Image (cartoon, rainbow, N blue to C red):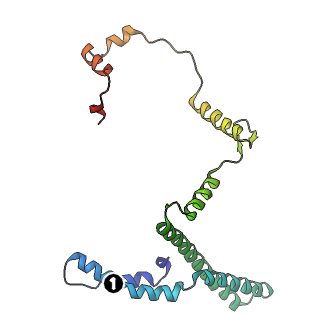
Amino acid sequence: MWSHSPAFKPCVQQHWSKEWQGTKMFSLVKKLKSLKWPLKMLNKDDFNDVENNAARARISLEYIQDKLRSDPQNSDFIHQEIDTANSVRFLDRACHEFLLQKSKATWVEKGDQNSKYFHSIIKSRQVRNTVVRIENVKGVTWEDTMEIQGAFLEFYKSLLGATTSTTAISQNVVQLGKVCSSEHCSMLMAPVTSKEIK
């Protein structure tokens, strides 16, 4: 989310370019610690209450667009509309990133510990992955579970092709090429032992 802010890269570059005496790991830790406060301030300035800010920005945009409809030639309204639209896009993207990260953080925290949250996630995934209607290769729509299964089977069977008559393989032709010796044949036919599997 922070990476969308124009102040993010200069802030990171400024603190990352500092040199620290010591091992590489010590230097890395010091750089990360020096970035902690500036990034907290960036979050406070640009992303504080991002969900409500995004909603307020959309309301402002609608208000300015209403004013612009009543006076389309007004250059102040045009510039305000452009600036507010840019702000809405920025905040919407930041809000989306924030909610995405929040959902990942919730999953990491609550995880698959057989909790109510875990089961609600499983149910939502099942609903999202359920096929409730399908059109078969003939253009007929099916909604019954067994008919949907049949449509899938019909489609994949058609991909495998149909049975056709083929010419029998001539053993004389096979013998002309390279063939396994009887010793190799017995090795290939030998039963697989547990030791081999291990």
Closer to the camera, 144 or 175? 144
Rendered residue at 36%/13% (across/down): 174
- Give the answer, above or below, for where 128 lies relative to 29: above
Residue 54 shown left or right of residue 174 in the figure: right
Rendered residue at 26%/32% (across/down): 195
Residue 71 shown left or right of residue 52 in the figure: right
Residue 44 shown left or right of residue 71 in the figure: left
Q: Looking at the rendering, which quadrant does residue 65 occupy?
A: bottom right
Closer to the camera, 174 or 187? 187
Task: Please tell me how many numbered marks the rendered image carries.
Answer: 1
Residue 23 shown left or right of residue 173 in the figure: left
Furthest residue toward bottom: 76
- Give the answer, above or below, for where 36 lies relative to 165: below
Tag 1: residue type? Lys
Q: Is residue 42 in view from this perspective?
A: yes
Furthest residue toward left: 22
> Considering the numbered disc 1 on the image, is that residue within a helix, a strand or a loop?
helix
Q: Position of residue 15 (x, y in %)?
A: 33, 85
Q: Which residue corresponds to mark 1?
A: 33
Rendered residue at 25%/80% (across/down): 27
Q: Quadrant of the C terminus?
A: top left
Rendered residue at 70%/89% (across/down): 77
Q: Position of residue 81 (x, y in %)?
A: 67, 85
- Give the answer, above or below, for where 107 lies relative to 194: below
- Give the answer, above or below, for where 117 lies relative to 56: above
Q: Looking at the rendering, which quadrant does residue 159 occupy?
A: top right
Q: Residues within 10 Å of mark 1 (few under 14, many from 20)?
A: few
Furthest residue toward right: 70
Q: Position of residue 133 (x, y in %)?
A: 71, 46
Q: Position of residue 148 (x, y in %)?
A: 69, 40
Q: Is residue 14 in view from this perspective?
A: no
